[in-house]
Amino acid sequence: MVGEPVLVMLVEDNVDHAELVLRTLEEHRIANKVRHFLDGQSALDYLYRRGEFSGTTDTERPQVILLDLRLPRVDGMEVLKTIKEDEALKHIPVVVLTTSEAEKDVAKAYLNHANSYLVKPVGFEDFKNLMDDLGFYWLGWNTNPSLGE
C-alpha cells in the first residue's frame, strides 16, 4: 500500500474521539482521506451505495474500517456482522475501536470476524499513542490484497 491513496472509514458517534482520530492520522500523513460516519446506518448505506449514496460514484471502498460498537441507528456489532458476511466487503479489515472492555463484547466481535479489538484509553496522551500505533500498523505496514470492487 506504500504510495497508494488510503481511504479510512471511521464510524464513530463521539465527535471528540473522531476528532482525535482524524488529527492523529493527519499529523502522520497516513491516510489520504477519511470518511467519517456518525452512525451504523450511514456507514452501511455508504458501503452498499444506498440511501443518500445511491447513484453516486463517490463510494470507493476503504482500506480499513475503524468501528465503534456503541452507535445510534444500527449498532457497531451489527455493522461488523453485515460487513463480514458479505463476499464483496469481508476482505476489508475492521478494527473495533470502543470503550467497552466487556469480555462478551470482545468475544462477540471476534466471533463476527473483527480483525482487531482496541479499547479506547481514557487519557488523551494514551489515546493519541494508540492512534499513532494503529495508523502505522493498519495503514503503513499492513498489506491488503488488491481486490476489484
Image (cartoon, rainbow, N blue to C red):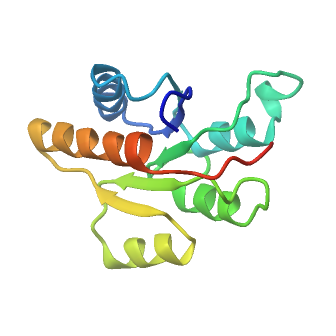
Q: Which image quarter is the C terminus in? A: top right
Front in this rendered view, residue 19 or 102: 19
What is the residue that sits farthest to the right in this orientation?
55
Q: Is residue 43 left or right of residue 94?
A: right
Which residue is rendered at x = 10% and y = 37% of the image?
Answer: 125
Question: Where in the figure is residue 99, as x and y percent of width and height?
Answer: 29, 55
Q: Position of residue 72 (x, y in %)?
A: 53, 45
Residue 32 in sight here: yes
Answer above or below: position of 132 versus 71.
above
Q: Position of residue 124 (x, y in %)?
A: 13, 36
> At 32% from the left edge and 58% from the top edge, which residue is drawn?
118
* Residue depicted at 38% across the width and 29% down the height: 30
**Residue 95 higher or lower than 42, as above or below:** below
Give me the residue at 32% from left, 41% from top.
136
Q: Is residue 148 left or right of residue 132?
A: right
Residue at the outermost front position = 2
The image position of residue 122, as x and y in percent, is 15, 47
> Foreground residue, 36 or 57?
57
Q: How many marks?
A: 0
73 sits to left or right of 98: right
Query: Is residue 69 something one can see in this rendering?
Result: no
Instruction: Specify whether 60 is left or right of 112.
Output: right
Looking at the image, residue 22 lies above or below residue 111: above
- Where residue 129 sits, quadrant-wise, is top left
> From what the image shows, is residue 45 above or below residue 29?
below
